[in-house]
């Protein structure tokens, strides 16, 4: 039986047994994009008929697709904050629960139908079939760094749970069919442990005691993977002792159920402890993943968008293991798309949006007057017209768009803030490169530097100096300093394994040279001051992650480094960790 192209994810999933069935399903839904999208829109409109949001826009009963397109405006988070607050207060409109997300550096809450999205399981199943098509990557265990947080409840009694945590703490995960081809090295008690430090320690310990079975390593986002591995530097001594003794350290792992579950897979193994000690004690981190997990053939983690900066450190730590960046997902809708060619080079990753998951529209880049995360008044935001929105089946190769979503759970024409570029089509489904998050990060005068421009400039400046050394840029962020005139950009860098005295003044010069023509003109004319680079102590970005996670509602697994530091606490963590700085002392006189 072929799986249905549309309908409940549970029904679809139950028909996706073999990889062959999964790939047939992919062929079917990518061959009929326009009609699946139009059927899905009708289904969403019927399921949500008569919600207050529709009434507010003059739509009663079941709106038609024409009404939807002509009456409903394009919205950003600010436009629905009051609605979200109302749902959170328990005054439910429609059938929403709440889910938290973090993009844009602050907590956002989105309506959700259940604790986790079953569509996310469809996405994962497709990703696995696509991977299996490219090689025997799923024949052993996966050391996956998964971190969840406790679901919270609003004062109105509505559950808050982040996308990943929602699934890993759900009965659906606990009662899942254990597939020997995709099992984790960590027991469920570790995967569901809400304490980051204990979970991180146990992931490493369990992964190391089963090292010969580990065929893939990873985490959802690359930043989490890098942080988890870096922690080995401080933890390998305790881990080796636990392996030698065959019992987990009860001072580090204080949770009894977690300890019991980990102890159940330990037995004293002095030989293994010695082998691991030998690899870790010399401080040589190049290729540590291949040396500790000799059977590992793949890294599974998202390395596009803001995560692309971790590719180089992952390459160094894994000695070039292939990276599968399989999933494109977001709290707004959980499941957006899959990379159908997962073991491609990082620069070639494309995501195919699944027409059965959400109703997708696209705002051509030239029609974007302002980005959703920018601080603007209502008037300016609502000025962005819906007239030029393009449907999924009608986007053009080579064009860039901002993604606009209508979801089954009740987001209507919502600007996600992701800029995507159409690179090619698979059947009639467009395949997108993730370009960047929308929005200007840095601006002092007429200059406007976005995430991608900053990323390119930072990477170029770093590579010129450190490409052939063992030192890798672990993370970076930036801000504008207007406390002195003229204002200027500050870029913060953290290096691994050991911060080295870099020629920071020269790096500043090169970074400026890689910024836009407008920036350089402003610099020459003196309306923008000389850029500064500040090298921060190791562990600074971990502290920022702790702060953001503890105050922002995301789980560690979903965290993304804010590329522009706006939160005063984040700025103070950065400033108190500076160990060296440089400033652009001169500028080239012509562009
Ligand atoms: P969150 O709000 O925490 O659910 O994060 C969702 C956001 O993460 C998306 O809107 C994207 O900006 C980013 N994201 C998710 N998947 C990818 C991906 N595969 N590549 C680049 N960015 C991604």
Image (cartoon, helix red, strand yellow):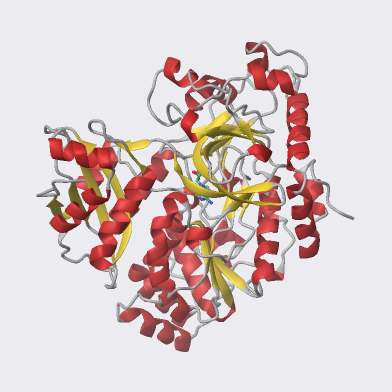
What residue appears at the point 61 percent right and 56 percent down from the top-left corner?
Answer: 339
Q: Is residue 94 left or right of residue 109?
A: right
Q: Residue at x 30, y 81 (%)?
A: 282
**Residue at x-position 76% and y-position 64%:** 19
Q: Position of residue 455 (x, y in %)?
A: 35, 51
Relative to 234, is 450 above or below? above
Q: Is residue 476 left or right of residue 424?
A: left
Which quarter of the figure has residue 56?
A: top right
Please, which residue is most extreme toward the right here? Answer: 1
Q: To which quarter of the image does residue 493 belong?
A: bottom left
Assign the N terminus to one quadrant of the image: bottom right
Image quadrant in which you'd find residue 158:
top right
Q: Position of 176 compared to 150: left or right?
A: right
Q: Is residue 526 above or below residue 260?
A: above
Return the residue nearer the eye: 533 or 284: 533
The answer, for residue 348, to whether it is visible in the render is yes
Q: Against 422, is 59 above or below?
A: above
* Residue 576 on image: x %, y %: 19, 48
Of the pair 157 and 316, the residue shown nearer to us: 316
């Amino acid at each position: 039986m072929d799986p249905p192209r549309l309908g409940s994810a549970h029904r679809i999933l139950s028909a996706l047994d073999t990889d062959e069935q999964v790939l047939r399903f992919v062929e079917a839904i990518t061959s009929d994009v326009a009609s699946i999208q139009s059927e899905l829109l009708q289904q969403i409109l019927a399921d949500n008929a008569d919600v207050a949001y529709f009434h507010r826009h003059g739509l009663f009963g079941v709106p038609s697709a024409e009404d939807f397109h002509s009456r409903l405006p394009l919205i950003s988070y600010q436009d629905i904050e009051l609605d979200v607050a109302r749902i959170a207060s328990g005054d439910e409109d429609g059938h929403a629960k709440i889910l938290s997300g973090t993009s844009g550096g602050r907590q956002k809450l989105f309506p959700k139908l259940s604790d986790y999205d079953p569509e996310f399981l469809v996405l994962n199943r497709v990703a696995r079939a696509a991977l299996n098509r490219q090689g025997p990557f799923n024949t052993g265990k996966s050391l996956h760094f998964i971190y969840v947080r406790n679901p919270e409840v609003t004062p109105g009694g509505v559950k808050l749970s982040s996308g990943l945590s929602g699934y890993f703490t759900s009965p659906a995960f606990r009662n899942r069919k254990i597939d020997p081809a995709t099992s984790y090295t960590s027991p469920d008690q570790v995967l569901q442990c809400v304490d980051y430090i204990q979970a991180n320690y146990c992931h490493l310990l369990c992964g190391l005691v089963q090292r010969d079975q580990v065929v893939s390593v990873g985490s959802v986002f690359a930043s989490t993977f890098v942080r988890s591995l870096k922690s080995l530097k401080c933890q390998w001594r305790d881990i080796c002792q636990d392996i030698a003794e065959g019992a987990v350290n009860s001072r580090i792992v204080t949770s009894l159920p977690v300890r019991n579950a980990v102890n159940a897979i330990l037995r004293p193994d002095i030989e293994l402890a010695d082998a691991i000690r030998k690899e870790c004690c010399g401080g040589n981190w190049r290729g540590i993943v291949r040396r500790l997990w000799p059977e590992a053939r793949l890294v599974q983690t998202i390395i596009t968008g803001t995560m692309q900066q971790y590719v180089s450190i992952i390459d160094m730590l894994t000695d070039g293991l292939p990276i599968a960046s399989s999933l494109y997902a977001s709290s707004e809708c959980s499941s957006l798309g899959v990379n159908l060619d997962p073991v491609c080079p990082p620069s070639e990753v494309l995501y195919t949006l699944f027409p059965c998951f959400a109703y997708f529209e696209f705002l051509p880049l030239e029609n974007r007057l302002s980005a959703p995360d920018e601080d603007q008044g209502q008037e300016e935001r609502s000025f962005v017209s819906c007239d030029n929105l393009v449907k999924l089946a009608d986007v053009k190769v080579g064009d860039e768009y901002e993604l606009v979503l209508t979801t089954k759970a009740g987001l209507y024409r919502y600007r996600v803030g992701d800029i995507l570029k159409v690179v090619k089509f698979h059947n009639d489904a467009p395949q997108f490169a993730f370009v960047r998050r929308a929005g200007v990060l840095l601006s002092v005068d007429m200059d406007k530097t976005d995430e991608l421009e900053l990323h390119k400039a930072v990477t170029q400046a770093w590579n010129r100096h450190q490409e052939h050394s063992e030192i890798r840029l672990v993370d970076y962020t930036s801000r504008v300093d207007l406390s002195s005139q003229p204002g200027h950009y500050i870029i913060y860098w953290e290096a691994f394994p050991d911060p080295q005295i870099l020629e920071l003044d020269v790096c500043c010069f090169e970074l400026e040279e890689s910024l836009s023509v407008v920036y350089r003109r402003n610099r020459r004319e003196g309306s923008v001051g000389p850029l500064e680079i500040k090298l921060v102590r190791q562990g600074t970005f971990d502290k920022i992650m702790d702060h953001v996670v503890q105050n922002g509602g995301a789980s560690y697994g979903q965290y993304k480094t804010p590329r522009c530091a706006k939160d005063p606490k984040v700025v103070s963590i950065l400033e108190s960790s500076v160990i060296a700085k440089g400033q652009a002392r001169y500028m080239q006189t012509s562009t």
